[in-house]
Image (tube, helix red, strand yellow):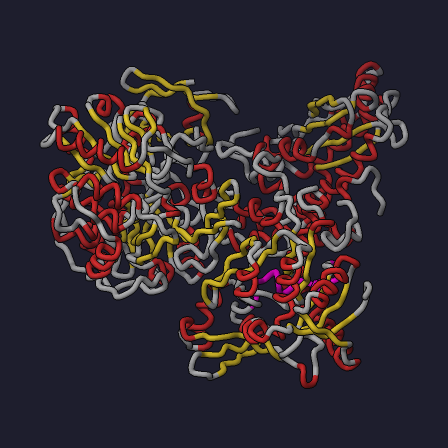
Amino acid sequence: MANVYSTICPGCNFGCGLYIRENGNLDVDFRKSSPANSGKLCRFGMSLPRLYTPVRSMVDGKEVELTEAAKDAAKRISASKGSVAFLSFGNTTCEEHLAFGKLGEAYLCTGADFEALPKDTYQTISVGIPYSEIEAAKHIVLFIDPYEQYPLIVRRILSAKKKGAKITSVWWKDLPLADENLRPADVSKLKLSGDSLVIADFHPLSDMENVKNVLSLAKNAGARITFLKPFANSTGAYILSKDAKQKSLVQLVEDINKGAIKTLFCLESDPGEMIPAETLGKLTTLIVQTGMASAITKKAHVVIAHEPLYKKKGTLINNEGRAQSLGGEGTRGLDALGVMAGVKFEFGVLNESVKKTIGINSIDEFTIPKYDRPGYAAPQASVKPVDAKTALVSVFNPFMWFGLPDDNDFVEMNLNTARALKLLKSGTLKIRSNGSAIEKRFKIGPVQENVLLTGRKFGIEKGMLTPVEISR
Amino acid sequence: MQKGDMFVGWSTKEDIRKRGGSGGLVTSVLAAALDKKLVDAVVVLRKINEFEAVPVITSDVNEVLKSAGSLHSVPSNFAKIIANKNLKVALPAKGCDTRGIIEQSKRNAVSLDNTFIIGLNCGGSMHPSVTREMLEIMYKIKPEDVHGEEIEKGKLIFETKDGKEHAITIDELEEKGYGRRESCRYCMIKIPTNADLACGNWGVVGDLAGKATFVEVNSEKGAKLLQNAIDAGYVQVEKPDEKGVAARAKIKGAMEGLGKKWKDKVFVPMDNRLEYFRKELEHCIDCGACKTVCPTCSCGDVSKCTEYHLRGDAYKMSMYHLIRFLHLADSCIGCGQCSDVCPVDIPLTRLYRRFANPMQEQLKYEPGMDLRKPPYFEAKLEV
Amino acid sequence: MSAEAVAPNTNGWEPKIVAFCCNWCSYGGADSAGMGRFQQPPSTRIIRVMCSGRIDPLHVFNAFLEGADAVLVTGCHIGDCHYVNGNDKTKIKYKFLENVAQELGIEKERLQLNWISASEGERFANFIRDVTAQIKKLGPSPLKPAGVV
């Protein structure tokens, strides 16, 4: 009567298990035995039923069958040979990612800028350390806002704290769970040791100099380091493409801007969230293969609609390197990729190949496969200080809300900054940057003076730190 | 058969007896209700492994026959699953499930006339993640090797695949922070007298021990349900042993005594409470899971606690929690679901109970135990 | 002029008190307090509602969270409600509210209930004076947000 799927939350790479209950409408149900999250879900996980909106295959706005859409996409891809880019951030299963790797060999973009980093850091960035090690750490150093960015890590850190760990945060605001709060500008005061565990994050919009900086900080102190990642299968995608030439998001944007790329194929990835709209507008063809409707499926020339993630069959690898099976049966995504690549992708064969790559015989979510953790040489970093009086700090939010209403449409700021501007309680704040201006609600918090923090994109930001002018 | 009758019964089908616990009576009553069209659907646990099962609504008798039996480490609550579904349904329910269902019916989300509740005696359940950790640390066995579990004479016993039994007293486990969920420890509803039937192995003595279920009929609906199973040939019953009835009452008394002790231990009087609540709630990430899972809440998506709470507010305490504290002061049934699902491990049930305990005692109101209107909605205060 | 009302407050801090008044009785009481020239400190912000039964506990919570040092719930005497039994409902809500506030650790002086009829101007003024004195002793509310005075 009711269909219940045991699945993994596609919000970030944390690997939270849950059930999706199909009963007229969708409901989430808590999978309390799930090893990554004990059934607990964050704000995004709780709103999955709103996210999984059905999508239909389309060619130029006309509804068609999946195979037909895939055939049409194949035609368009071969027609613009040499100027096609294939984008998959890693929001899909390992099996699909392997098939995708074969299809998109010519220009494969995972968004991650591995080229800017030394080769020997690849594995360290790709596979994080087990959460149980975070709980057992003696000193945890955070280069993230766990509450906003990776909420399920909070309880692991709190558990470590209960066991006596010291928590240091290097962030623009004081975090309730930290014992010591440093500002990013004071990172030189940070004392690391062999007992320290550094938690940072790595995503397509990461500032590579910052990534190099934390890598070398950890390396020089002999501390362990783990990178949290934003896409459901980031870890899997990086492990499986380690021998492929991966293009970064910056490169892709540049290539589209200069006209080298005219056709973009996106697999379960929403470029609308990451690539400026004017860049996307330069494409002649946009092909989107996805399991759910979003703003980008409305813009795409071809939509190849397979089943949503919870109905798929396949493997996801979470941030710890834990391989987890999805509870669905669908392989239509593979079928569509096969049509485009001109081969038939067998799920079984790909699944074997995934298992072989990570060196396991069967997918068991309770056992983390053994991964090499090779050392690396401390990379040279040149972090540029921001020389602006006031900066808007756009915290990378791994949760792609796909236009869903989210309750974070405000900036957080310091009380003194607000007082200096004579802001009114429950009023708004005018923020100007490069000629564009917005007006936002503000929230008073323990934030660094002259910094505006936000987890949302307002459209005026240039990278993570945007110099802005503010007034009442 | 009428309200107040007690029986000892078992399934007539051998394979159900073998797989289900205690003679498979509950499974058979559910199957019979479905088979004879007494209900359109039943709720059962679909077993995934020893520590995991998922509740499903089904009309398939085979699914019922395959269902999981009793699992101590599946702390789910069925009330929200059947809410607003308009189904004629039969379901097994622990004390807290039953209380949840009755509270939902007061809020017009469940029709009790169409809901047959088979109550299960319950001494407490365990969180699956905690259970896995407990097996590795306290029992020194691999969770994968576990074959079965039972609670006997205050001991939690795990049977491994090699046939060995591993027993540790529950007191010792709970001393170390394992064992039952905290809310189960101070729960006072051990035999669900608020359900249509109350079933369990307490009171099954002599030759039948472990092979039959003790049933108490609590309502006419319960009598109908059990009679249906007998008439359909699914279940056999006989009068219980006098000794059994006494033994059942004794276990109940002992469990309640233990519950009372835990209650006093957990809810010690406190100074500086505002600081305590602020400290506990400071990690809240506004996921709303505690409300979604709450079996007494039936407001849906648009509710006071969410609509009057904005993430942009820099209040010292969130409106969301204040409103929930107030709303649950008379309605909290202490099922522990909110603590289970909190992503930042706030002991929410404990917080809610801090408000609910004095209020419910003062108003002599036990939510979910009868059909009395929640005092907050009375026109005049009775007590 | 009473001595209390003019006594300068020692620490220079004036509490902010939110008083919910019902349209038919206690608001009238506040009015006649003014007409009768009964002295009262300027600490009170009156919010008029049609009936005290309209006062939802969340209004009271919100007043505290926005920075009120005390919140007063006032209405017609029991039996005198303009809407038959609105204040009976107030009584129920207030019982819950009081309980939550007490468990939460908010001092009981900060949340008070009083029935005041339209003719009891003096009673209203005295009530406000008493509460103000009590709150001055207690100091600012612990729920007052940062930056709000």
Residue A406 x/y as whole percent: 45, 33
Q: Residue at coordinates 38% horizontally, 34% vertically from top-left?
A: A55
How many circles with numbers are drawn on the protein? Answer: 0
The verdict on residue B188 being magenta is: yes
Q: Which of B133 and A308 lies nearest the eye of the viewer?
A: A308
Where's residue C148, x and y in %? 55, 29
Q: How far across and down, in percent of the image, does residue C58 sit?
A: 65, 34
Residue extending farthest bottom: B207
Classify B264 as above or below C147.
Answer: below
Q: Can residue A464 be seen here?
A: no
Q: Residue at x 69, y 44 (%)?
A: C100
- Compared to residue A208, the image places residue A466 above or below, namely above
Q: Which residue is painted at 36% across and 42% down in the image?
A: A307
**Residue A448: horizontal and vertical position, in percent?**
37, 35
SS majority, magenta = loop
Is any atom of residue A368 visible in this view?
Answer: yes
Where's the C terminus of chain A, which quadrant? top left
Query: Relative to B179, is C9 above or below?
Result: above
Q: Quadrant of residue A116?
A: top left
Q: Residue furthest left?
A: A82
Residue B89 shown left or right of residue A321 in the figure: right
Direction from residue A67 to residue A443 in the image, left or right: right
Quarter where residue C40 is shown: top right
Highlighted range, magenta: B180-194
B286 and C106: which one is in front?
Answer: B286
Magenta span contains residue A231: no
In the image, A334 versus A380, the foreground residue is A334
Q: Quadrant of residue B252?
A: bottom right
